Image: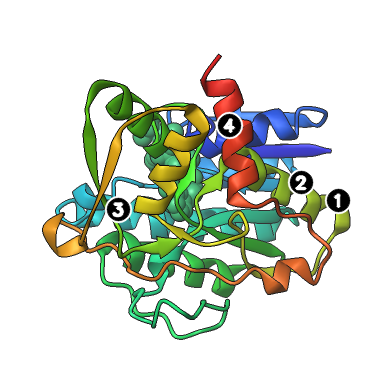
Amino acid sequence: MKILITGANGMLAKAVKQELSENELICTDVSDLDITDMDAVRETVNKLKPQYIINCAAYTAVDKAEEQVETARKINKIGPKNLAIAAKEADSILIHISTDYVFGGDKNTNETYEEEEIKNPHTIYGITKLEGEEEIKNNCAKYYIFRTAWLYGEGNNFVRTMLKLGKEKEQVEVVSDQHGSPTYAVDLASIIHQAIKKQIPYGIYHATNQGYTTWYEFTKKIFEIANIECKVVPVTSEQFVRPAKRPKNSKLSKEKLLKENVNIPTYEDALKRYLKQELV
Ligand SMILES: NC(=O)c1ccc[n+]([C@@H]2O[C@H](COP(=O)([O-])OP(=O)(O)OC[C@H]3O[C@@H](n4cnc5c(N)ncnc54)[C@H](OP(=O)(O)O)[C@@H]3O)[C@@H](O)[C@H]2O)c1
């Protein structure tokens, strides 16, 4: 199967390339294919006519986006729009990744978000990612949008940062009022692969690891598994102000994906597998 991957140097893309390595992969980074360039996207997609396009490209600097609004919008909205138009013309299936930030995260943290609930993003990143979703829905019919959250994988990420801090410091302060599901990029890549193999119905799906936690509890779990003796001190979001407001509730319900018999490991299981690799 011929699959075009955009943004192929990113964290998720690395896991996707590994997971789908038995296919004919055409991997492009921004220097090969800038997804904001309509002519280039159209030319590449029409020439290759891939069965699938997996868009791993995005503007992901959540705080910087508050200032770089136009750049974020170009990459997160116009990029997916270009890919959707080109996918439709070439009869390719578009797989796109979105985020928990499309919701405001204001819902009671005892509850979870389902796919079609009202969106109320509070950040430029969330707003532009939601615009990207809308462009895909409006411009092609054969698409999957997988909304993920709290992603970690190859390269710098939250878990690696905490491992480093935990070894260097006696205590770390971590936010305890943001709730969500840490998600291993390898497991998201597997979900994408399963969706392709099972040919699940097109549409939007929530795709994170199973189970819910807070950054504070997650850090304690990281230290427990890695045998690191470092005190974890809970702090509130208000004590840890950042340019872009983080959603307090990022709990995405996976019911829709589970109904398609897609296997989704728990975040604890995922963390153990990741740490096994990371700690050698
Ligand atoms: N990381 C998370 O916690 C998280 C959470 C929820 C959802 N997501 C979503 O998951 C997806 C993958 O995220 P990730 O963490 O793997 O992102 P990432 O590591 O930041 O990778 C994004 C890639 O896109 C490339 N890119 C940027 N502009 C481009 C353009 N115009 N054309 C082509 N490529 C371009 C970047 O290249 P340069 O580095 O050269 O700019 C980078 O290699 C994204 O859609 C993101 O919104 C991520």
Q: Which residue carries the number 4 mark?
A: 274
Q: Amino acid at mark 3?
A: Ala
Q: Which residue carries the number 2 mark?
A: 193
Q: Amino acid at mark 1?
A: Lys
Q: CA distance from mark 4 to mark 1?
A: 24 Å
Q: Amino acid at mark 2?
A: His
SS at mark 2?
helix
Q: CA distance from mark 1 to mark 3?
A: 32 Å
Q: Position of residue 78 (x, y in %)?
A: 41, 57
Q: Is residue 101 left or right of residue 68?
A: right
Q: Residue at x 30, y 53 (%)?
A: 72
Q: Earlier in the sequence, mark 4 or mark 3?
A: 3
Q: Is residue 178 left or right of residue 2?
A: left
SS at mark 3?
helix
Residue 36 seen in render? no
Q: Is residue 12 above or below residue 127?
A: above
Depth check, mark 1 against mark 3: the one in front is 1
Q: Indicate if the residue with disc 3 has its beta carbon within 8 Å of ligand 1.
A: no
Q: Earlier in the sequence, mark 4 or mark 2?
A: 2
Q: Residue furthest top?
A: 280
Q: Residue furthest bottom?
A: 118
Depth check, mark 4 against mark 1: the one in front is 4
Q: Quadrant of ligand 1?
A: top left
Q: Is residue 92 left or right of residue 252?
A: right
Q: Is residue 225 above or below residue 93?
A: above
Looking at the image, do the residues carrying marks 4 and 2 touch, with CB atoms under 8 Å apart? no
Looking at the image, do the residues carrying marks 4 and 3 touch, with CB atoms under 8 Å apart? no
How crowded is the residue under tag 3: few (<14 C-alpha within 10 Å), some, or many (20+)?
Answer: many
Q: Which residue carries the number 1 mark?
A: 197
How crowded is the residue under tag 4: few (<14 C-alpha within 10 Å), some, or many (20+)?
Answer: some
SS at mark 1?
helix
